[in-house]
Amino acid sequence: MPRSAPPSNRFERRRAETRRALIHAARQILAETGDTGGASIQAIAERADVGFGSFYNHFESKTELFEAAVVDAMEEFGQTFDERLTEIDDPAELVAAGFRLSARMADSHPELMQVLRRRGLGHIHSDNGLARRALRDLEAGLASGRFTPADPAVALSALGGTLLSLVELRFARPDLDGDQAAVNLAEMVLLMLGVPPDDAHEVARRPLPDTAG
């Protein structure tokens, strides 16, 4: 989960641990079934191994908890990109590497990617997680001339929708070559963003940074 400054005293640490446990339990439920309505607060508390009454010390409703769980997952997703793609400066290469990393994360981080699969559409234009990072990279590409001038919000919609389709493909068709599918989609997206065909083909196939783990 996303890292933050450690609480300063024992009470705050325990409170933070309880909140993290509840969010983790909610993420598991989202990843396993996506059925937030069928999970009772008692069942969530038991899965988190916390007392039933502790739930209301942190959340007013299941809706609030599951939204916090999605935001938590999206932020972890964005942090993963920041950590693993930090040495890439070319906006086009960042886009391509992001697609390829996402395809691999379906295997390495299945819970996280199932949450993205089930709830990502509603967060394409959020101000947290991967969305704000993708918008940053799109705006950098537009400002530098790497991408053809377009409305960044529209470009983000196309980018996010294609990424979610790739994630869906990885889970729906595990028999397919996920790396090759990601390369092909990345090339298509670069073409859509105005990168010349030969350049898009080459950029989509550049060696990825070390993404082990």
Image (cartoon, helix red, strand yellow):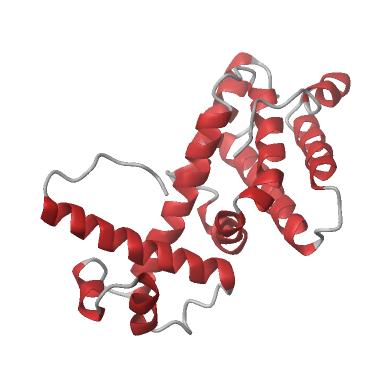
- In the picture, measured across the screen, residue 58 lies left or right of residue 139, that is left
- In the picture, measured across the screen, residue 200 lies left or right of residue 193, that is right
Residue closest to the eye, 160 or 57:
57
Where is residue 199? Give x, y as percent: 82, 19
Q: Which residue is painted at 72% across and 58% down in the image?
A: 168
Does 17 appear above or below 56?
above
Q: Quadrant of the C terminus?
A: top right
Query: Looking at the image, can residue 135 be seen?
Result: no
Where is residue 129? Give x, y as percent: 47, 44
- Mark count: 0
Where is residue 148? Give x, y as percent: 70, 24
Where is residue 145? Give x, y as percent: 66, 16
Image-quadrant location for residue 65: bottom left
Does 25 appear above or below 193?
below
Q: Which residue is painted at 72% across and 54% down in the image?
A: 165
- In the picture, measured across the screen, residue 8 lies left or right of residue 138, that is left
Q: Which residue is painted at 64% across and 18% down in the image?
A: 90
Residue closest to the eye, 148 or 111:
111
Residue closest to the eye, 107 or 176:
107
Does 187 appear above or below 13?
above
Q: Which residue is painted at 75% across and 24% down in the image?
A: 207
Image-quadrant location for residue 171: bottom right
Query: Looking at the image, can residue 58 be seen?
Result: yes
Does 76 appear above or below 64?
above
